[in-house]
Amino acid sequence: MSLLTLKLVLLSAVLAMVGLADMARAELPLAGTMKSIDGANVDLGSYAGKVVMIVNVASRCGATPQYAGLQGLYEKYKDKGFVVLGFPANDFGAQEPGSDEQIKEFCGSKYAVTFPMFSKITVTGAGKAKLYQVLTETADPSGEVGWNFEKFLIGKDGKIVGRFKTRVSPDDPAMVSAIEAALAK
């Protein structure tokens, strides 16, 4: 094999590895840009290296009081590298009909929410946001979001380390243990 051929083979291998690395990164949930509830573009990559809980939220749901528990988790662990990201969605029973401004006002006045909130999105079906496409395809178990306040826990490495259904409250020992374990890594 000539030196030129060897260089071409090595270059092809490197390009293939770079392409695979880019594809793997694209499948991590914390990739891309989303709109904050105030309309600013937020690079989800800015949360890399943190433990992140992503939650689809709604203001008129039986689980809406979970805002208080999510805020409590955020306050307890934020200085240790934990963040809650709230994504309002109107996909289940039309329980989030308000505008971003109305949702922000409700969350602030009723639950004193200070964790980052984002613009209303779709989390299920044909119009599902890319973030939720990745979450629902790569979580274990995979599958569509079942209702409001379903929680995805992302580790510091950007991979999903837990998925908690609506009925699992923010103070559930299994959830708290999963957060603490992810923070300890």
Image: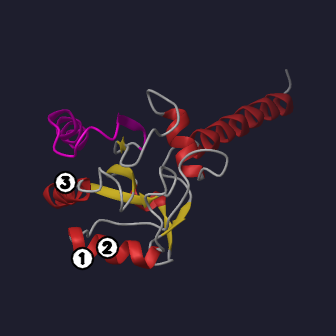
* In front: label 3 or label 1: 1
* In front: label 3 or label 2: 2
Identify residue for label 1.
109
Residue 79 coordinates in the image, percent (x, y): 17, 60
The residue that appears at 26% across and 38% down in the rendered structure is 168
Element class at badge 2: helix
User: Dividing the image into 4 quarters, which one contains the C terminus?
Assistant: top left
Is residue 43 magenta-colored?
A: no
* Magenta stretch bounds: 158-185
Mark yes or no: residue 74 visible: yes
- Badge 3 crowding class, 10 Å Cα cut-off, few under 14, some 14 to 19, many 20 or more, is some
Residue 16 coordinates in the image, percent (x, y): 71, 35
Asked if residue 114 lies left or right of residue 148, the reply is left
* Numbered tag placed on residue 162 in the rendering: none
Q: Quadrant of residue 68?
A: bottom left
Residue 126 coordinates in the image, percent (x, y): 67, 46
- Amino acid residing under circle 1: Ser
Identify residue for label 3.
69
Q: Quadrant of residue 183?
A: top left
Asked if residue 177 lies left or right of residue 87, the reply is left
Instruction: Give the mark nearest the N terminus, 3 or 2.
Output: 3
Instruction: Give the mark nearest the N terminus, 3 or 1.
Output: 3
Asked if residue 168 lies left or right of residue 116, the reply is left
Q: CA distance from mark 3 to mark 1?
A: 15 Å
The residue that appears at 29% across and 50% down in the rendered structure is 63
Identify residue for label 2.
106
The correct choice, above or below, for 57 with respect to 7 in the image is below
- Badge 1 crowding class, 10 Å Cα cut-off, few under 14, some 14 to 19, many 20 or more, is few
- Amino acid residing under circle 2: Phe
